[in-house]
Amino acid sequence: MIIGSKILRFEELPSTNTHALMLIKHGDEPEGTVVCSAFQSEGRGQAGNKWESEKGKNLLISIILYPSLVSAEEQFLISIAVSLGICDFLDRYVNRCTIKWPNDIYLKNDKIAGILIENSLMDNSIESCVAGIGLNINQTEFPDSIHNPVSIKMAAGKEFNTDTCLNILLGDLDSRYKELLYGDRQKLSDDYISRLYRLQELHAFKTGGTLFKGRITGISSSGFLAIEKQDGTKKQYSFKEVDYVF
């Protein structure tokens, strides 16, 4: 096992990602080390957003990786592997989840997990990576500031043991990471595309303040979102270039 070979548990941290980055800086921990905290006082999400979680109710983890077999231009494959590992885990307990590009996991139209991946690059290689995951397990009440949250408990109607969930999740993440390193990367990409939220459905999007309708058709090798507009034109969008309209 790579992911989960060592687990560091904390009652509270400012941020599991920040702590994992500090460990990398000091070179203290092996690849696959997991930083797990019952609570984060300064939990971080994508693009500077804050990740909110009730103490002890959910999984808040960050994984230290050294993916030397993945080039810098292929770095989105790490997000693909992590997203699929979470989906593999969730499939045991809830109806099919989807991946809202680039970094959220959805049940129908509700968000159950978020991912924050921070890579350190050197030339064309990934020197180190921290993969942060916030996964809602037993929380049923959320701040009004959080849009469309859901948890496994809310979806399945029962309480779950977070330690058991952690062990199973790490096994699923480890399998997908090994598939990334040693397996069929095209299959990984195909699995990811098949899970995309709103795949091939006609919906509204916004880019640069302009609204348009289109269908998500897939992702590029660099992780850009491919959308075919209603008029038949096709374009690929990088992160923050396009927004979903609900």
Image (cartoon, helix red, strand yellow):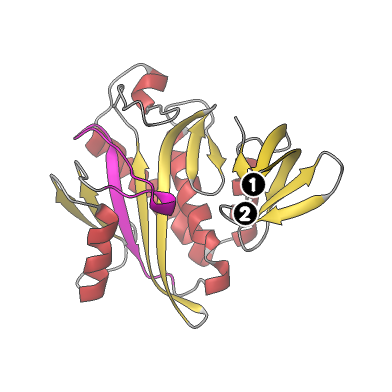
Residue 243 in the figure: left or right of residue 92: right
Q: Position of residue 8 (x, y in %)?
A: 18, 55
Which residue carries the number 2 mark?
A: 189
The residue under the point 62% across, 34% down is: 245
Relative to residue 126, is residue 21 depicted above or below? above
Q: Position of residue 165 (x, y in %)?
A: 30, 37
Q: Position of residue 83 (x, y in %)?
A: 48, 47
Residue 93 in the figure: left or right of residue 106: left
What quarter of the picture does the N terminus occupy?
Answer: bottom left
Magenta region includes residue 107: no
Do tag 2 and tag 1 residues touch (Cβ < 8 Å)?
yes
Q: Nearer the viewer, residue 196 or 31?
A: 196
| SS for dot 1 | helix
Q: What amino acid does circle 1 point to?
A: Ile
Q: Nearer the viewer, residue 5 or 61?
A: 61
Residue 181 in the figure: left or right of residue 56: right
What quarter of the picture does the C terminus occupy?
Answer: top right
The residue under the point 37% across, 20% down is: 154
Which residue carries the number 1 mark?
A: 193
Q: Position of residue 51 (x, y in %)?
A: 33, 42
Relative to residue 225, is residue 197 depicted above or below? above
Q: What amino acid does circle 2 point to?
A: Ser
The residue under the point 19% across, 35% down is: 55
- Locate residue 184: give its quadrant: bottom right
Question: Does residue 179 show up?
Answer: yes
Magenta region includes residue 47: yes
The residue under the point 82% across, 38% down is: 230
Span highlighted in magenta in the image: 43-67
Q: Main secondary structure of the magenta part?
A: loop
